[in-house]
Amino acid sequence: MKKTCLLLLLLICLSVSAASGEGEFYTEMPALLSFTQNTNTQTVAENVFIEQTYPDTASDMVDARMRALIDEMTENNRSLLPVENADLVSYLDVGAVVSRSGTSVLSFLTLAEVSRDTAHLSVDYQTRVYDLETEKELTLSDFFAPDSDAWALLSAAVREQLSAAFPALEPDAAMLDRLCAAESLMHAPFTLGAARLTLTYRADALYPGKNTLLHVHVYYPEIRHLMTPYGQAQTDNSRFRMVALTYDDGPSRRSTRRVLNELRSHGAQATFFIVGRNIARNHDILSRQQNSGYSIQSHSYTHIYPRNQTTKEIFAEDEMLRRELSEVIGLEPTMMRAPGGMYPYYIRRKMGYPMINWSLASGDSGNDNVRSIAYRLQNRAANNDVILMHDLNSKCHEYSAAFLDHLCANGYLCVTVEELFSRAGVPLEPDTLYYSPDRIGK
């Protein structure tokens, strides 16, 4: 009788738990997906530095291979580092942007980037995808069968997205055809993220003289049904809570680079709503954001509140931002965040952008109390939040680091706005206001 009562009690508890959603999400990061990153800095000459960032994962073998790759890429790119004119600061930065997926897959987009002062001089890259359980290096053939319809879908995505880069230029047609061929796709450099598969290419392969990377993103809802059973399992991220980190008002020479270091260290993606007037003096930072696969979007050109501008001035500003940004990274913005939260002014004028607000504000405007900002975010963040921060804040990297520690420890994935809404199955429509996938419109 006691056993029967206990069994009934257990079933009732399980039923209540399932109904409330408890136990649905991870409460800590799976061990095979946990990692840290360690940075070594060498001073080559006065104001000339080499920074190497090495991942420390659950696999000694993967760590050894990544260390060897980072060391090799450092040596291959060392000669590109300027050492003359000590008045200008130069960096060779080599490290991996790491992303998690499934139960045991880590992807490494390893970048070697050379910059001098505000100029981005060169980028080299390699991608590696590992199953940390088997320690196998994965290829796209592990995710799609040779006769899968996915190859045609990927080919169309590559053609469409690469052709749309650098709007004022035409891509090399013969090279584009080669990159879209099935044989090329089967060996294409790729990574897996929380909500999308990404293929990565050098821009100068198609657009001579353009010194950046171009990413072709294909979101899982489009392709998971075409994957192998293994691929479907390792792109099922439904047990992760996800948030979109967004940073406004930059880039900032003082702090954005340090924010990017913290994002890389924690394996976090983010969306940067930039102010157009900051583009000219931050080509190196914007290129690094683009190369790392972060989302770069519009926060207007001057940050003047739209109630103080005419329709003609608003559209002229938008055109300047689109032109200047695309000349640097090849892409125009596809979303906007309104200065001062004044969305009606833009929506009434039919700007054509999805308007992205936020569901959780950090309270960092005019506030550099790291502890209070981090505490606020840690205690309020929830699944599907769009989180507002400002990378102009000189302490932004510090409270970002503390908050990211908390998120990673509790099994969250940090994604771009596009990834968050795709995972939720919410399309981003023009001239529509979004606070989060759970709250749309007024």
Image (cartoon, rainbow, N blue to C red):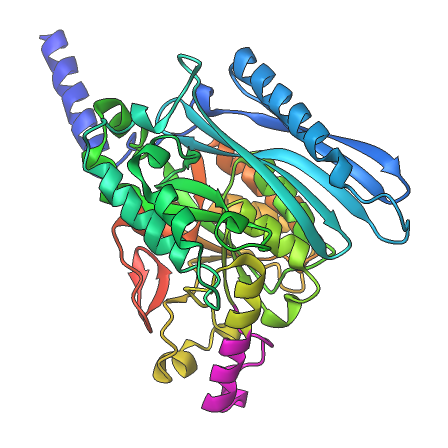
Q: Quadrant of residue 70?
A: top right
- On the picture, is 111 further left or further right than 132? right
Q: How many marks?
A: 0
- Which residue is rendered at x = 35% and y = 84% of the image? 348
Q: Is residue 113 visible?
A: yes
| Quadrant placement of the C terminus | bottom left
Residue located at (40% from left, 60% from top): 164
**138 or 296: nearer the viewer:** 138
21, above or below 161, in the image: above
Q: Is residue 322 left or right of residue 174?
A: right
Can residue 315 be found in the magenta stretch?
yes
Residue 364: x and y, percent? 61, 59
Q: Is residue 366 above or below residue 200?
A: below
In this orientation, which residue lies closer to the viewer: 193 or 303?
193
Q: Which of the pair 337/52 is nearer the observer?
A: 52
Residue 261 drawn at (x, y percent): 64, 41
Q: Position of residue 374 (x, y in %)?
A: 59, 46
In the picture as drawn, the residue positioned furthest to the front comes out as 174
Viewer-closest of 105 and 348: 105
Q: Position of residue 303 (x, y in %)?
A: 58, 75
Q: Does the stretch in magenta take in 106?
A: no
Q: Is residue 221 visible?
A: no
User: From the viewer's perspective, is residue 350 above or below residue 380?
Assistant: below
- Left or right for 161, reference 259: left
Where does the N terminus fall, quadrant-wise?
top left
- Residue shown at 61% from the left, 49% from the top: 288
Magenta stretch in the rendered image = 299-320
Horizontal relation, residue 327 to residue 233: left or right: right
Up/down of 30 relative to 294, above or below: above
Residue at x 48%, y 65% (from the top left corner) = 169
